[in-house]
């Protein structure tokens, strides 16, 4: 499907815009699942000031959604009306270390933040090495793995609100909870500062190797997947509940529950967004029937069916 092309109107209203506007741009290539319809408009800002300029002049009625590397995202087959904003690594992907603090742009890979910290002998960020997303997503959902979470190391985050205003949020102001933050959903994070502790380099590398080994042996990282599908219920593991419900290997169309790790859904080659979301909902239903526990999606689902 295609949406009405509104890019000429946007360009006319924003004569000083430096970023790139594309109409009806496929989003499938921007997600790990490789599914989904187009964005009505895909905007790639040149830098933070360009992003603020765009948001300030964007008609309020147009919905806005931001994507990173699409590692935690299902785009529905009807696509995404309004504007999808993608922060490119060239403008938002820098990382640096100073003392025990790492500064990173929102498009920096979590893994790169761990590597930057390790190169500066900063410990405490090894868990980022096992998270297949960007810092923007980590800030939004308090990403965590292998015993660590974003909230454990964040000093402050910077973002731009829907009206184009720049904001800085301290750790407490992020209102972190398990796999979420309480900052208004319209804020687009642009950078962050993290504090670790000066640690022996060999100990840091050993811990990062443990994290990598765990990912490679326990997760289907070479498949078209989206990371952990459901949040772990309090005192329980989502994968154990899914396995107990008999869903390991379950298929809907081209989508399948991973045989390796039940909390991962995979695109076996020809899945649609509908296949993957339907499979997830089927798993939720069966887990509720067998255990009485309701699983909640960790993967974000956007767009129209």
Image (tube, rainbow, N blue to C red):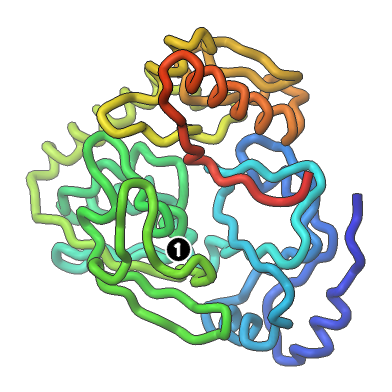
Q: Quadrant of residue 40?
A: bottom right
Relative placement, left or right, of 151 versus 197 is: right
Q: Quadrant of residue 132?
A: top left
Which residue occupies 30% across, 25% down? 236
> Is residue 52 placed above or below 155 in the rendered structure?
below
Q: Quadrant of residue 255?
A: top right
Badge 1 local density, few (<14 within 10 Å), some, or many (20+)? Answer: many
> Is residue 160 placed above or below 269 in the rendered structure?
below
Front residue (pair 171, 109): 171
Q: Where in the figure is residue 295, as x and y percent of width and height?
A: 46, 31
Relative placement, left or right, of 126 versus 233 is: left
Which residue occupies 41% across, 57% down? 135
| Residue denoted by label 1 | 106
Q: Where in the figure is residue 34, as x and y percent of width and height?
A: 69, 37
Front residue (pair 218, 302): 302
For the C terminus, the quadrant is top right
Q: Where in the figure is residue 59, as x and y percent of width and height?
A: 73, 82
Which residue occupies 68% across, 87% down? 57
């Amino acid at each position: 499907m295609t949406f009405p092309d509104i890019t000429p109107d946007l360009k006319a209203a924003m004569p000083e815009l430096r970023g790139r506007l594309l109409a009806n741009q496929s989003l499938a290539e921007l997600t790990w699942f490789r599914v989904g319809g187009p964005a009505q408009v895909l905007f790639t800002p040149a830098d933070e000031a360009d992003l603020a300029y765009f948001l300030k002049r964007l008609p309020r009625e147009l919905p806005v959604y931001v994507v990173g590397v699409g590692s935690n995202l299902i785009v529905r087959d009807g696509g995404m009306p309004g504007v999808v904003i993608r922060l490119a690594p060239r403008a938002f992907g820098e990382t640096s270390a100073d003392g025990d603090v790492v500064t990173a742009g929102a498009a920096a890979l979590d893994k790169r933040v761990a590597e930057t910290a390790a190169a500066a002998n900063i410990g405490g960020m090894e868990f980022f090495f096992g998270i297949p997303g960007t810092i923007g997503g980590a800030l939004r959902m308090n990403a965590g793995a292998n015993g660590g979470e974003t909230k454990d190391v964040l000093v402050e985050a910077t973002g731009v609100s829907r009206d184009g205003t720049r904001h800085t949020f301290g750790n407490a102001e992020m209102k972190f909870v398990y796999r979420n933050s309480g900052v208004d959903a319209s804020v687009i994070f642009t950078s962050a500062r993290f504090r670790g502790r000066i640690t022996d380099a060999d100990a840091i590398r050993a811990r990062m190797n443990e994290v990598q080994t765990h990912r490679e042996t326990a997760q289907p990282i070479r498949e078209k997947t989206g990371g952990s599908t459901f949040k772990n219920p309090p005192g329980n593991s989502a994968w154990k509940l899914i396995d107990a419900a008999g869903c390991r290997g379950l298929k809907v169309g081209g989508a399948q529950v991973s045989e390796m790790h039940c909390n991962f859904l995979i695109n076996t080659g020809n899945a649609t967004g509908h296949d993957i979301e339907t499979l997830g909902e089927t798993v939720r239903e069966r887990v509720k029937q067998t255990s009485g526990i309701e699983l909640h999606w960790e993967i974000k689902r956007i767009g129209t069916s």
